[in-house]
Image (spheres, rainbow, N blue to C red):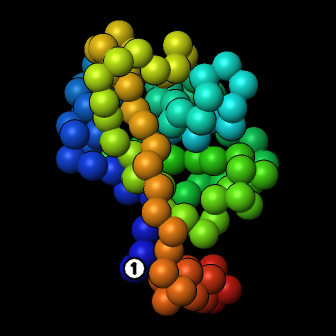
Amino acid sequence: MVERVKATDAALELIEMLKEKHGPLLFHQSGGCCDGSSPMCYEEGDLLIGSQDVLLGKIGDTPFYINKKQYDYWKHTQLIIDVVDGRGGMFSLEGVKGKRFLTRSRAFTDEEYKELKESIES
């Protein structure tokens, strides 16, 4: 099964460290404004998920959401969550670690996109 979102080993390690400290987490792909287009990591319950948010999948057993309008632009791509040195979004939990999550992406192949569409329709 093709995944809409996945994480690098480095990102998965950081997610586990954050879960040990904060408990259950969730991600939301930021849409611009204050923190650019960063994947934002929150303690579960600190961000209200609305009817316009789409669950892309899970990384490190942590749900990953994106706003529907942004999803419509990115639905042809797989999001690959990585981690790099530096300060990211001021509201994201990893900032105090001197690390930040970063979204990389790649376009789905025609076959992968067809498989994704078929899985939604069934």
The image quadrant of residue 14 is top left
Residue 51 at x, y percent in the picture: 78, 48
Residue 29 at x, y percent in the picture: 58, 40
For label 1, the residue is: 1
In depth, the one of 47 and 118 nearer the eye is 118
Residue 101 at x, y percent in the picture: 40, 33
- Image quarter of the C terminus: bottom right
Label 1, residues with CA under 10 Å away: few <14, some 14-19, many ≥20: few
Q: Please state if 72 lies on the left or on the right of 14 as rendered.
A: right
Residue 59 against residue 97 in the figure, above or below: below
- Tell me the SS state at disc 1: loop
The answer to whether one can see residue 81 in this image is yes
State the residue at coordinates (32%, 34%).
83
The image quadrant of residue 24 is top left
Q: How many marks?
A: 1
Amino acid found under the numbered disc labelled 1: Met
The image quadrant of residue 1 is bottom left
In depth, the one of 11 and 18 nearer the eye is 11
State the residue at coordinates (40%, 53%).
80
State the residue at coordinates (53%, 33%).
38
